[in-house]
Image (cartoon, rainbow, N blue to C red):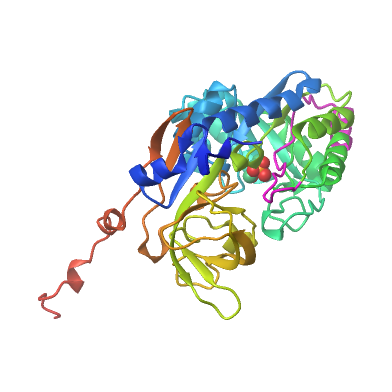
């Protein structure tokens, strides 16, 4: 459910007509709904109610805008971060360091050190050597780093290959059959409080049975670790729950997910941790765009919009589907391809799609663009960096500026040896 609906023929975000945002901010622009973010945060928490005490760490890579982080902090969410930059954002948004989980397969020594200085709540270790280095850094600072070992359970998440992370050949986590031996070597290290395990098998998961299989394997490992005398107090079950991208898609609800987790983890006697990203942010945002041209094509016309793959990379990266709706639909329909201005054939959002009929100058949205949208934006083709707007009821604010191509150009320079007039000798 989300708060983007047509009222009197005009698509609104909550009480704000998208025409007003286009007038005042321009296009393309991401538009987020506060009420939808809050609702998703609450529904996810509610779904996990059967589990008792849990820790919720929003995976901020899905949508790291500082205003979004602030509002999720108000909903009681901590953060799952995967870089020093994300750590800085979470802290800037007022998320307590103790509520931050530091994930990521390539944390640098400098990032680990900064995490220790900030008092990050948990480090999710991706390899044995990282644990050794973290222990040494912490010991030198007179600290003990709270940590869990991320395990790769070798389960196919049944999602797009580029967002699948839990197969043995993926780069993430340690092989589950080596985890107990590694745990035994790491647990005794001064400087490390190795207190549990973590897993995260992929994103946009539509099939709970894959997650269930991964969690069962984690349960077996927890029992094995305890039998070996280790104290296991925390298990981080990651994120990955999918969202509907097409009108009519049905996906497992947070309540279905919570019921499955309750069944699988019964008797584990640990604090369970979760890292939801997409399920919180996906349907809370749209990418608002203007039609530049409707260009005749061989079979179908091309609707060329002013948003492109640099603003929303998912279709080019993952062949992803985003519903496309006119802001002020006429009621007529057309079959069209939808593409952006970037000079790549991959800059195509849809082919042969049945859509609201549009003409140049019309406004339209790509729906379900709140997760892995603006966060992946680039300035390819020397386009501006796309801005973001947050709506709350009948008010809205620009929460990320459009960064003009000229501003990016101003950060570049020609070295003096390439300057005209300089003696080549
Ligand atoms: C990306 C990621 C998540 C969030 O995944 P979603 O599919 O957006 O829920 C959680 N944990 C880790 C370690 C991740 O890398």
Asked if residue 211 can be seen in this view, the reply is yes
Asked if residue 192 can be seen in this view, the reply is no
What residue appears at the point 42 percent right and 52 percent down from the top-left corner? 28
> Is residue 229 within the magenta segment?
yes
Q: Quadrant of ligand 1?
A: top right
Q: Position of residue 340 (x, y in %)?
A: 48, 64
In depth, the one of 61 and 220 nearer the eye is 61
Question: In this rendering, is residue 230 above or below 172?
Answer: above
Q: Quadrant of residue 238?
A: top right
Q: Is residue 204 left or right of residue 383?
A: right
What residue appears at the point 58 percent right and 68 percent down from the top-left corner? 337
**Which SS does the magenta portion mostly show?**
loop
> Is residue 45 within the magenta segment?
no
In depth, the one of 183 and 21 nearer the eye is 21
What residue appears at the point 58 percent right and 25 percent down from the top-left corner? 99
Q: Quadrant of residue 146?
A: top right
Q: Position of residue 54 (x, y in %)?
A: 72, 23
In magenta, the rendered stretch is 220-249
Q: Is residue 250 left or right of residue 126?
A: right
Rendered-image quadrant of the N terminus: top right
In depth, the one of 212 and 112 nearer the eye is 212
Rendered-image quadrant of the C terminus: bottom left
In the picture as drawn, the residue positioned furthest to the top comes out as 52
């Amino acid at each position: 459910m989300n708060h983007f609906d047509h009222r009197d023929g005009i698509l609104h975000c909550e009480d704000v007509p998208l025409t007003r945002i286009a007038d005042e901010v321009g296009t393309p622009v991401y538009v987020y709904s506060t009420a939808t973010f809050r609702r998703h945060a609450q529904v996810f928490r509610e779904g996990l109610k059967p589990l008792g005490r849990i820790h919720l760490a929003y995976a901020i890579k899905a949508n790291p805008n500082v205003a979004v982080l602030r509002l999720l902090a108000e909903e009681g969410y901590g953060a799952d971060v995967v870089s020093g930059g994300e750590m800085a954002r979470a802290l800037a948004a007022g998320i307590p360091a103790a509520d931050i989980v530091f994930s990521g397969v390539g944390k640098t020594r400098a990032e680990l050190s900064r995490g220790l200085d900030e008092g990050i709540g948990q480090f999710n270790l991706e390899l044995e050597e990282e644990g050794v280095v973290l222990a040494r850094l912490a010991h030198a600072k007179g600290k003990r780093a709270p940590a869990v070992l991320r395990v790769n359970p070798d389960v196919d998440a049944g999602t797009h290959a580029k967002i699948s992370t839990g197969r043995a050949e993926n780069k993430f986590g340690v092989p589950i059959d080596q985890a107990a031996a590694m745990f035994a070597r790491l647990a005794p290290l001064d400087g490390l409080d190795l207190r549990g395990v973590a897993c995260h098998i992929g994103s946009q998961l539509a099939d709970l049975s894959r997650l269930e299989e991964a969690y069962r394997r984690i349960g077996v490992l927890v029992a094995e670790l305890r039998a070996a005398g280790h104290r296991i107090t925390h298990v981080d079950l990651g994120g990955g729950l999918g969202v509907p991208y097409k009108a009519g898609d049905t996906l497992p609800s947070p309540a279905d997910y919570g019921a499955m987790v309750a069944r699988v983890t019964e008797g584990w006697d640990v604090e369970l941790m979760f890292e939801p990203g997409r399920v919180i942010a996906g349907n809370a945002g749209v990418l608002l765009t203007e039609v530049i041209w409707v260009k005749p094509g061989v079979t179908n016309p091309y609707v060329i919009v002013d948003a492109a793959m640099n603003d929303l990379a998912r279709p080019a990266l993952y062949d992803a589907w985003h519903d496309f709706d006119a802001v002020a639909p006429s009621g007529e329909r057309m079959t069209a391809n939808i593409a952006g201005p970037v000079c790549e054939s991959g800059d195509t959002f849809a082919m042969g799609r049945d859509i609201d009929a549009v003409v140049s100058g019309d406004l339209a949205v790509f729906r379900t663009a709140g997760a892995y949208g603006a966060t992946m934006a680039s300035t390819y083709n020397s386009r501006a960096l796309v801005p973001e707007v947050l709506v709350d009821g009948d008010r809205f604010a620009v929460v990320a500026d459009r960064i003009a191509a000229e501003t990016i150009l101003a950060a570049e320079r020609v070295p003096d040896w390439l300057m005209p007039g300089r003696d080549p000798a």
